[in-house]
Image (spheres, rainbow, N blue to C red):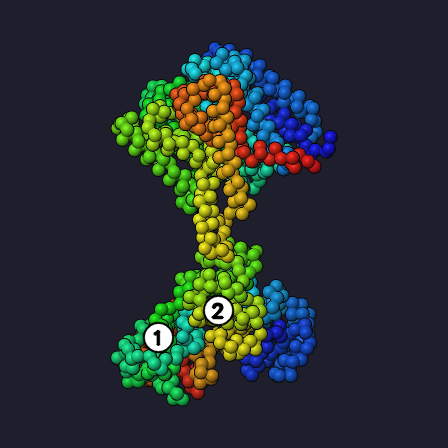
Amino acid sequence: MTALGVDVGAALNLIGALLRYLSLAFLVPAVLALGYDEPVWPFAVSGVITAAAGVGLGAMTHGRERIGPREGFLIVALVWLLIPAFGALPFLLDEPQLSNPMDAFFEAVSGFTATGATVLTDIDALPKAMAMWRQLTHWLGGMGIIVLAVAVLPRLRIGGRQLLESELAGPQEVERLGATIRETARRLWVLYIGLTVVAILALASLGWSGADPAMNLYEGVAHAWSALALGGFSTKNLSLAAFQPITQWVILGFIVLAGINFLRLYRVIVQRHASLVARDEELRLYLTFLVVGSALVLIEVLAGGFLSGAEAVRSSIFQAVSIMTTTGFATSDYTRWGALALMTLLVLMFIGTSAGSTGGSIKVVRHLLVWKLIRRELTQTVHREEVLPIRLSGAVVDERALRSVVIFFPIYMGLFALGAVLLAIDARRSHLALGAFDAIGAAAACLGNIGPAFGFAGPFGSYEPFSDLSTGVLTGLMWLGRLEIIPVAVLLSRRYWRA
Amino acid sequence: MKILIVGAGQVGSTIVEALHDEHELTVIDLDQARLNALGHRFDVLTTEGNGASRRTLQDAGIADADLLIACTSRDEANLVSAMLARALSKAKTIVRTTNVEFLDVWRERQLDVDFVVSSEVETATAIGRIIGMPNAKQTDVFADGQVEIVEFDVPVDLAHGETIGLPLREARIPGESKVASIIRGEQLLVPRGHESIMPGDRVIVIGSPEAAREWSGIVSQAAAPIDDVVIYGAERTGVALARVLLDQGIRVRIIEPDTARARRVAEELTGARVFQASGLDPDFIDRERIGQTGAAVFAMRDDEINLYAATLARIHGVRFTIAVVDEPASVAVLEHAGVDVAVNPRSVTAEEIVRFAHDPRVRQMTMLEGDRYEVLDITVREDSELVGKPFRELPMTGSLIGAIVRNGSAVFPHGDDMLLAGDRAIIFTESSRTARVERVL
């Protein structure tokens, strides 16, 4: 065997450390299970297995702690497969609806990637601890496992930057919030935790004040985690339709907030640089997309007579925002709406949130930069020699970053098309009644980490009818979408592995 | 005054030429040959050595010098000279720099130097003024640019209007300005109320920059001012000029063949359009309609290339061409070859330094029309006989108070205004009356 250019041992060593940390996360559902008098063992066993795997990996690769930029890609790709694999253990061990390993893995990947697609058909039937574990996977994955690792693990002081950049959403370099990348990661998580606490208090107080009888501390935590991660899992079959309008509005507010670049949010909320927001082109476009998308859906909903009055307004805005921010909560079954609404929602699936947010899909900044590139290209057809640096909110964008943005579009659209076609092929093979639009929707919803799609996989539906093969394809799309493809695609090149 | 000049290059020699009559000069340079050349032409002392070394400065007599002018082409050496002079004497210091940043730092009072001159910025502002008023023969600024003195040639075929051809007391004169002199052939006219400006005259006007531009409109045939400029070359002078022009609200296009430099300038200057191209390419000039521009400035490194590019631009229809030249002789060569104005940054810099080096009470002094007129910037003494008299009572002689700088801002006095002690008066006078003016004030 020729010498490998990548230190796989070092990558596994770090993953071992992460698994040891993950095992602690099982304490949360375990404690809940104790409190609610539900079975504790699934979480205890999962925790022990995960910890053992972590310790084992650590022992096998003892002392290989130095990671370089190359290992970063491998680590990120593997982390986002292995963490959900261990996170799926409680589902596999004690949830009858998820006894199929592929289904359990799908559910866990959907959770950690904050997608929100589910193969469950009866969520209400889940034990409280199990349901909460599902919500927790969203929250842990939302801000990023690696971001957390960089914040917590002292050894990532070296090499942390590349790791962070391959995980954090968006095409640009990570701007530093603190003196070090570690401090930046810490502040991101502090902000994330802070916003979550605010959301929990806001939601729970709706329950305590009697404004929403269905709301309580448990539901508040569950939905705050899901909302800030832009996930979409709910503890209810009816998703947010099980709650009062006031609750839906509050959650809508937090979703819009979580779709903004957290690096920007930190500067505004904590460092009080409000002027940054006014000049932020990405933020303005993000809000514009939200408004235009909501308006188009509202027109269809009102004109088609699907809903009326305040409910029409609330549900139209909520669905448009929920889909574009890649969340996936639902207040109404949009699959029954007309073509204009469905087309708008499908297009919104390809827009996504701001870079550096917890959301997925293509990201607003990429659309913005491509638009600027198109304009530059048009100018340069007439004025060949004109030098036109592309600026984003005043700052010049590096040409290399622009190239990666341009490359991103065909890769993303290609994967989407490939996914949709594979679903159609598998539907023919397994005699599944799958409409073309539904295949498109499912592929787009998983690649964009959105969750609910159309047809049977709609907001109140489930991905359960898909065969294991299709579920596997969709799991792959979620994984690729969360990592924005490139870090995974790099692993496919032979040059990556060579010394 | 005893003045030490560090650097005997073009700037240094020009300064020596201007100051050697009135002051005691010592020139320091590393190059003995240059010093010899200067020493033969002018009555100055010379010291061979590094002006940034303490020993050399001491040998040259820094201890009892009144002024140090550090004008080598090396910014850092100039700064070190000035810092040493500060430590070794009470001399005032003037530093020449090519780096605009030093100028900014100095303005923020973080450089302990009395005066900083940047060739690039001085040249850029000079060209900016020319473009602002393309038909002005000569422009000079006073009081940090608040007062301008401009010479115009009134075209022979200009039609009479509200201003031209009417007695001055009836003519429309821009508010913040005064006619300082009318020159008709060899005849100098004191601009009393009954005189009028006729086509073919040369007029000298004192006023605010806005009023000066208004005058430019009055005496020019082509009414439209220049609103777009093409700059050839994105070297420091070109970039400084682009900034000046953008500030004036003029559209700027820059042509720069070097890819990296073009990119850097495009990133730096948001308002300007930058083209990575050779200005010597006729296809490009044609495609980009360079010929339709109001003015083109040639600020590339070689005088020869500037001349070639300017000629090509003129062939394509550019009406007004300005070149920035390197060699002193090139000014005449390029202007002879048809370039409208050629500017030598070193002589612009030297002029600026010389102004500062003059008598401390007379802040600035400029000669107009050869040495027929002088413009003085004098602080009025308390016991001056003119203090407290309204302007209407002052006699009309060959001298004129064109503007007053009071508490930092310029006032353009009318009949009822009075001169106060401590005012800075910008005075336009026939050279023969200079001594009298200084005495009276």
**Quadrant location of the C terminus of chain A in the rendered image:** top right
> How far from the left and from the top, in percent, is residue A298?
31, 32
Q: Is residue A305 above or below residue B193?
A: above
At label 2, the amino acid type is Ala
Q: Which residue is mark 1?
A: B221
Say which quarter of the image contains residue B406: bottom left
Establish if A117 lies above or below B162. Answer: above
Task: Tell me if residue B344 comes above or below residue B278 in the rendering.
Answer: below
* Position in image of residue B317 (x %, y %): 44, 70
Q: For the residues marked 1 and 2, what is the alpha-carbon distance in whole angstroms?
A: 22 Å
Which residue is more in the foreground, B329 or A423? A423
Q: Is residue A426 visible?
A: yes
Q: Nearer the viewer, mark 1 or mark 2?
A: 2
Above or below for B220 versus B234: below
Q: Secondary structure at mark 2?
A: helix
State whether discs 1 and 2 lie on one chain. Answer: yes
Q: Nearer the viewer, residue A260 or B392?
A: A260
Q: Residue at x 44, y 67 (%)?
A: B291
Quadrant assignment for the N terminus of chain A: top right
Pick the front one: A359 or A351: A351
Residue tagged 2: B313
Q: Nearer the viewer, residue B405 or B19?
A: B19
Which chain letter matches label 1?
B
x then y, percent, for residue A314? 32, 29
Q: Which chain's residue wears label 2?
A: B
Spot occupied by residue A243 in the image (x, y as percentages of width and height): 35, 22
Q: Are marks 1 and 2 in contact (CB under 8 Å)?
A: no
